Image: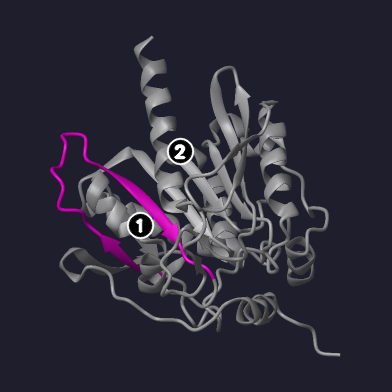
Amino acid sequence: MRKRSVSSFWTQALKRQMGAVTRTAPQASHWRTGTAVSAAGARRYCLFQTAAHIPAQGLALVVMLHGCNQDARGFAASTRMNQLAQSAGFVVLYPEQDRFANAHACWNWFDTRSGRAQKEASSILAVLDQVCAKYPIDTGRIVLAGMSAGASMAALVALQDPARFLALALHSGVGPGMADSTASALAAMRGRSPKQALHAAQQPSLWPPLLVIQGTRDTVVAPANGELTVRRWATALGARETAPRAVQRGARYVMTIQDWKLGTRVVASLAEVAGLGHAWSGGAATQAFSDPQGPDASRMVWSFAQRAYDKRQRQRQH
């Protein structure tokens, strides 16, 4: 019997769950494209540069990793992160997967045994190096976020250079250390036990605060992955669990939010969205992989990062 690839499994599940795609180009006047070349290979990217006033220390940067069957422009349109960047005054970076590396444009997050996943992560860090060198970026305010396969790759990137990121946000993805091959990735997506442990050698003291957003009706990545990812992250840090709380804004889906803390600092947070499938919560209605009924995940990511930054600044003042 022919083995199913992670990409084909993900693609078929997405086709069952999502409808037609309407592609919308981002605001062209602020859209930049480029390629970073490093020992890890060439990596294309798109950049949304806000027209906001640039402070002396530079602008905050949100790095967004798209999911399967997406590209930078589609992901920007789906998440509406550019519109938030324009109003809040930050820059958005969209590294892009090559179709030659994966026919469905999935990041190969699971292929750690061969080293291909680590190579892709290194190429994303090379993009970040280039953008920070070319644009007025505050390197102390870099946020990393991803959706689906992009979330899983974001976790790997963050663990390769954890001190670099202010915050990490994973939306509908499989957490770090869950797989090292196609077979283990498929098992992880179905919610089975992790392949690898998160251990002290990975310097958890340097890990950025983690936000996980997960829908309860996700048929691509089992909903159990959200809690499993957060608990493993928090356990490695020795954080304490706090009581969950329900949040609903207007007619949007109800969220259950739970935090894990070290002292007064939130080091991990889980937002489980009741009724959300495998889609960006609060995304554009015209886009695939988006659900406008959910709470706004883009604002959640930015707010989480802002709180982490404010907390860090207060700690430095004392």
Tell me if residue 21 comes above or below residue 268 in the rendering: below
Residue that mark 2 sits on: 304
Measure the alpha-carbon separation of dots 1 and 2. 14 Å
The reply, left or right, for residue 291 in relation to residue 140 is right
Whether residue 137 appears in magenta in the rendering, the answer is no
Q: Position of residue 41 (x, y in %)?
A: 44, 69
The reply, left or right, for residue 214 in relation to residue 126 is right
* Residue at x 49% of width, y 82% of height: 99
Tell me how the rendering is colored.
one colour
Q: Could you tell me if the residues under marks 1 and 2 are in contact, i.e. CB atoms within 8 Å?
A: no
Q: Amino acid at mark 1?
A: Met
Quadrant of the rendering where the C terminus is positioned: top left
Q: Position of residue 233 (x, y in %)?
A: 66, 39
* Residue at x 32% of width, y 48% of height: 61
Quarter of the rendering containing residue 6: bottom right
* Nearer to us in this view, 10 or 288: 288
Could you tell which of marks 1 and 2 lies nearer the N-terminus? Answer: 1
In the rendered structure, which segment of residues is drawn in magenta? 42-67
